[in-house]
Image: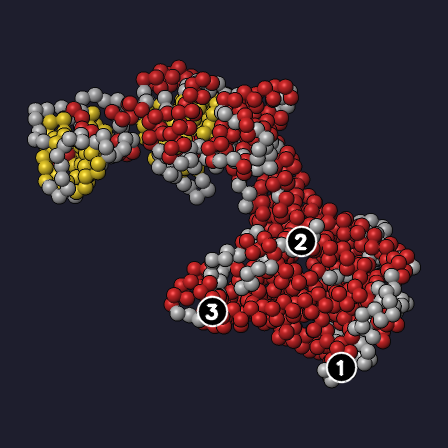
Amino acid sequence: MSTIDPVASTAEKAQHALMSKAQAEAPRVRARRTPASWVRDGGLSTLLFLLPMLLVFGAFSWYPIVRTVIMSLQHTNLVQPATWVGFANFSQVIHDPLFPTAVKNTAEFALLALVFGYPIPLLAAVVMSEVRKRRGLYSALAYLPVVIPPVVAVLLWKTFYDASPTGVFNTILGWVGLGPYPWLQSQQTALPSLVLESTWANAGGTVIIYLAALTGVNHELYEAASVDGAGLWNKVWHVTLPQLRGVLLVTMILQIIGTAQVFLEPYLFTSGGPANATLTVLLLIYNYAFGNSLGGDYGAATALSLMLAGFLAVFSLVYLRATRSWSTG
Amino acid sequence: MITFPFRRRAATADGNAQGLVSPADWRRPRVRFGLGSTQTLLLVGLIVIGLGPILWLAKSAITPTQDTITHPLALFPHGVAWSNLSRAWNDVEVGHYFWNTVVIAIGSWLSQIIVATSAGFALSVLRPKYAKYITALLLTTLLVPAIVLLVPLYVEIVHPPLVRHSFIDSYWAIWLPAGASAFNVVLISRFFDNLPREIFEAARIDGCGPFRLFTSIVLPMSRPILGVVSVFALLASWKDFLWPLLVLTDPNKQPLSVRLPTIESQTELGVFLAAMFISCLVPIVGFLIFQRSFLRGSGLGGAIKG
Amino acid sequence: MAAIRFEGVSKVYSDGTRAVDSLELTIGEGEFMVFVGPSGCGKTTALRMVAGLEEVSEGAILIGGRMVNDISPKHRDVAMVFQNYALYPHMTVAENLAFGLKLRKLSRAEIDQRVRAAAAALDLEDHLERKPRALSGGQRQRVALGRAIVREPAAFLMDEPLSNLDAALRVKTRAEILKLQKRLATTTIYVTHDQVEAMTMGDRIAVMKKGVLQQIGTPEELYTHPANVFVATFIGSPSMSVVPGPMIGVGGEGQLAGFRPEHIRLGASAAGSVGFEALIEVVEYLGDERLVHLRLGEQALVAKLPVSAAVQAGTRESFAVALESIVLFDSASGQATAWGAA
């Protein structure tokens, strides 16, 4: 029988003996954190890297957000210092006769945009996902309107919407015996006209998103469904749509939030007319702050912005709650 | 040469992998016919709806105004009016506003790249202990609609807090706020998060300090995401309307998007359409060349593989 | 090259886990030391503390007699070879090799000379202008090694460099690394979870488990005189069989008996050995020997028998083990109490 100290071999023991003196001198605790050690450890350079972001965001993002809240509670006049008016701005906005009009128009816009702009890209994407050759051509064509600057798109469609019989759309419809329509000039058709152009300009982006999600569906699920005896419609209903649930829900809420903030179309097409038929919340805010007739009422403008932001926040929370059970998986 | 990437897509769309329609289904003539005709219908639809308006714009840009007004869909009944283009460029000075748009776009792009890469590097690679607070602040910024910022930002430009001098009509009023894009920072941070940390450790052992790490290692490895961010930054700047409208009151400094609506009423239709067409050219050509970056970046944050 | 000392080194995380617990050991100049153990045992953490990639919570690490706890990696004069190679993807092989030298501001001539020497030693001369993605796994691994060699550091730190290679390449590269290290005589710490690598490569091996050093010694010491049950069963493949002593008539209550597969003989026991009967479950024919899986009560044992042994699955046979080959362990603490039960 023999025993050996498990931890140290003979060589180790010798070295231990030699170094025991050095051992006693070598410190065993870590150095304390000092400003010098913070710099040495790279703390300063990290801060330097963060500096551009902190400055830019501080000045142009975080500070304005705080200012909006403050300004909504003040009466601002660029000449004299601002005065605190409590919730007077909010009250003024709510009692403005244009307010319910703007809200109604915005809701109508968002709803119509959802009806036109939500299912059609999905159908297109489903058909496109099965294209064998030249799928890129389809994607490029679908996305092209998104790339066109919105100002150009709106002005172009403004020409299309010329209400005279020789306007582009009226000419085309004239070939099949329809029209001529007043398009932007009638209170009934103005808003839908705006929605039509907006859908044209934006649907392509949604198509691409759906296409990406569709091609990401695991092939084996379709194969398993085939083996189980599912036909085309069954596969769409039981495999494609459930897999796409997450994307579908996200694009829906994003679209609603986006269309609730529509500004360019009403501003450039009709300036909110005819007779405020296309006045939206964003256009109203713009008018409060920068418009010719009202203009300069920053308090009302910021108050209405906060109301819109608040509404969208609450709406998003409710939406997420309601769809939570739906979207997992 | 500009080529569509469809050849590439056919290669990646595995001929044997099964989508909704299995290879077996394809062989059935009814399915082939039904799906095939739907696809053709879609293609025709896309061409007419997606490409149609742009083609019309191109055609009308070189059609005499009278023809466009009276017979908008006819094809050059009285010949071509190339003069529309030259008048747009010279008389209406589209070239000048085009240049303004370019200058604004480049400045905004630079601002965004600098802010997003430096912040992303600090948060993702250097990872200080307080990173999570900054990220939380960033995320809240993402959730706030842009309209909330508009009025105070405008007031800030007109009456900057420290300086006694308004920034109206200065391009800095557009370039600097452009950098405050939380989306860019998040996108780049996530990309940096996915870089193998071992490479950073190897660089540290090799002797890299943070600045060297940023310039020699991280940035060169980031070309894909920088491409995506750049493409979107340039496009967003080209399309920007409301902010330049508010902040640039001097017509000489305005970009195309602000100028076009203003000159609509004073310009002959044909020349106006030519001006619009010219302002579309850069985005369209840019899109055709950089299709992959666009389409990849739009697939919900670059989740597409190739 | 330099000696490396761990003095009471611990790594404690904020939730209290001790990834490395009071590690105390010395690596001599030019020695090839292997840290081995199952995943999570702290071997990589210990290595990274030497590199400066992890902070030391308690204790001191000394390189060449100098305490390096607060010194940044680039000033410690160590070079590391990573498991996943960590090559710079946008640089050529030559640039990868030269990068650390450029940062240290060596002259162009010196850099060129070192890069060429390393490339020649590692058979990479034809690949100097290629990028990592154009190289095979084995070639990338050599570039990673090359990056460490050109630095001519005080120590090499290798973190499982062979684990991403296929088996044949691993055996070949193992030998090359050893040859290289002997030639350069650089102190090396080599981390692996593979005990075969540890046994074949190390001058000495440090076995770790859950942050605690189990035993340190030469491969032979660990094999013939394991300090506890863990080391005994970890080193050697197939593992040592450890059964309650009384089951084979050795030792008393509370004692375990361990013996290696090659020490089990077929047949009745003779003087100086103990015998037992066991059921043969599986016989594996390996060409030069047979691996026989036995069942003794609840215990599973493995025996290495010569090819000529007449064994058949499903039969009960008598086996014997020489007393001097048995290691006795205390079953409560797992510590070895005697090597050789004579």
* Nearer to the camera, C12 or C159: C159
Label 3 chain ID = B
Question: Which residue appears at 43% of the width and 44% of the height?
Answer: C15
* Nearer to the camera, B283 or C104: B283
Helix, strand or loop under label 2? loop
Amino acid under disc 2: Thr
Amino acid under disc 1: Gly
Against B173, residue C243 (above or below) is: above
Q: Quadrant of residue A311?
A: bottom right
The picture places residue A253, in percent across and down from the top left corner, at 59, 67
Alpha-carbon distance for marks 1 and 3? 41 Å
Label 2 chain ID = B
Q: Nearer the viewer, mark 2 or mark 3?
A: 3
Label annotation for residue A174: 1
Against A26, residue B18 (above or below) is: below
Label 1 close to label 3 by CB (< 8 Å): no
Horizontal arrangement in the rendering, residue A248 relative to residue A175 (left or right)? left
**Callout 2 environment at 10 Å: few (<14), some (14 to 19), or many (20+)?**
few
Both labels 1 and 3 in a single chain: no
Amino acid under disc 3: Arg
Q: Quadrant of residue B9?
A: bottom right
Against B297, residue A115 (above or below) is: below
